[in-house]
Image (spheres, rainbow, N blue to C red):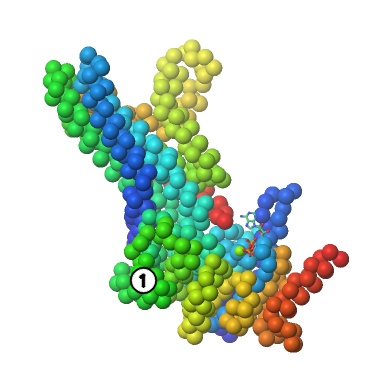
Amino acid sequence: MTIPAIEITGLSKSFGSDHKKNQALTDLSIVIQPGEVFGFLGPNGAGKSTTIKLLLHFLKPDSGSLRILGHTVGQDEFRHRIGYLSEFPFFYDHLTARETLLLSGRLSGMTRQAIDQRLPMLLEHMSLTEAADRRVGGFSKGMKQRLGMANALVHDPEVLIFDEPMSGLDPVGRHQIKGLIAELKQEGKTIFFSSHILSDIETLCNRIGIIHKGVLLYSGGLRDFLVAGVGLEESFVRIIEEANRASFA
Amino acid sequence: MQALRNIWFLALSTCTEGIRHRTLWAVVCLASLLTMANLGVTTLYSWDLGKVSVEFGLSAVAFTGLLLIFFLGMKILADDLERSRIFMLLSRPVSTWQYLTGKFLGLAMILLLATIILGLSAALSMRYVLWLYAAFVPPNFSWLTCIMALACQWLSLVVVLALSVLCFSFAKQPFVALLLAVCSYLVGQNMELLRRVVVENPQAGALAGQEQLVIALSWIFPNLSLFDKKYEAAYGMAFSGQEFVLLCLYAISYSALLLYLATLLFRHKEIA
Ligand SMILES: Nc1ncnc2c1ncn2[C@@H]1O[C@H](COP(=O)(O)OP(=O)(O)OP(=O)(O)O)[C@@H](O)[C@H]1O
Ligand SMILES: [Mg+2]
């Protein structure tokens, strides 16, 4: 049996102290095999970003375990093998795009030559070639998003974790990112990404997870999820409404 | 090896970021003008011109350094957290201590640069005053002592910087961190005075009989007044190399300790 790329078991996380506790995640378990593209869906405040931050050990879990490529998160060093794009990518305003990528590459343990070889291709891919030597402070939201993408891919990681990779992009940019994800899928990378945009998930993912108020409602194949005859959107709304009704009852 | 490299890259990028920041140059230009104002101020005094000029120059460096730490340095540190830039760095194989040390060294480099620029402009104005009023040049005046005093000034800034990194690593809000850092700076600045008052004077009011406490405190807070060598520089008093080395060691070990504590605290912090 192969080692799962990402393995989350019984994960719970709450914010705040006892009397004002906010349960963000409850007993969440997901397994993602290598080479899969996993779409993580859920309404606002469902706990998508929280799960991703837990995966990167920015937050510490209350209970449960997280493993990436067979290594326990927070214990072993495997971060040079994962690429991460945050929900709101921010950079040093006074560094140029090239310098930002150089810093990231070097911090991931790449040599200068390796970075120099890879940069032109990445910048070209993200249509940032012209802006490469401009300071990031002057970038638009979409440009920052694309730089964030390049930043996540600099060290050619095996596992990619994207938090809403298409947010803030125009249709052209979104199309580009979709193409990129499809390409990465071809290369056999494991991709875990969260999104609100159902149509993107529909075209890209093998498997999806649906989370609502910190509870995983569904995890499995995309095909199996789609109720016969209705699209992803319809099925998604249906399952969320059902969960809402159940919680009121 | 990779650890040292990581620290170096972080320091370098922090330094670059700081150097390209407008705040730095605004403060440095203002301070250079201030040291030039030396020329005007000193002529108001009719005695001890040399002393006034030297003290004035070194004070300008100290004051600017503090401005830079509290505004530029703390801003760079706080923005890392507030604007989640830290995610970009800590999602890579960079450990907490490497991150904090890299930031610290980068900011210390900025302070060094500012100290050198201001030191030069202060030296120019001092040179001019001393040349204009040769009669007031302190008898044993030496530029070497001045440079050593300047270096001590930088060391004390480095200690304050380490203190700010520590405050920043446990405070929930950047503003609180700033406030804490300023307070500990003020305490550190007056520690030696307090210690002397209490230890040498049996009638020291509320603190009488609390010598142990005060001595303990003077070990906890940095004894910043030790680094104040304005007086020596101004009067051209002997300032031994040995004392200088001891001060360097004190600054380095104290900062290292603070950074270590900061790492321990930072590990428990959730970044979101
Ligand atoms: N740092 C934090 N402190 C307190 N509560 C938090 C924090 N981060 C998230 N939460 C809470 O956790 C829950 C999940 O938030 P999360 O950001 O994971 O949602 P999300 O699914 O990413 O939503 P969105 O689609 O809007 O990005 C929310 O109720 C939120 O209020
Ligand atoms: Mg989110």
Which percent across, then down, holds residue A216? 70, 71
Which percent across, then down, holds residue A85? 51, 67
Seen from the viewer's position, the closer of residues B257 and A151 is A151
In this view of the protein, can residue B251 be seen by the observer?
no
Q: Which residue is mark 1?
A: A129
Label 1 packing within 10 angstroms: few (<14), some (14-19), many (20+): some
Seen from the viewer's position, the closer of residues A108 and B208 is A108
Q: Residue at x 63, y 66 (%)?
A: A48
Question: Quick one: quadrant of the C terminus of chain A?
Answer: bottom right
Seen from the viewer's position, the closer of residues B133 and B151 is B133
Which percent across, then down, holds residue B4? 35, 58
Q: Residue furthest bottom?
A: A228
Seen in the picture, residue B119 relative to A212 is either above or below; the reply is above
On screen, residue B159 versus residue B271, left or right, reads left
Which percent across, then down, holds residue B143? 17, 31
Task: Give the residue type that dot 1 points to.
Answer: Thr
In this view of the protein, can residue B133 be seen by the observer?
yes
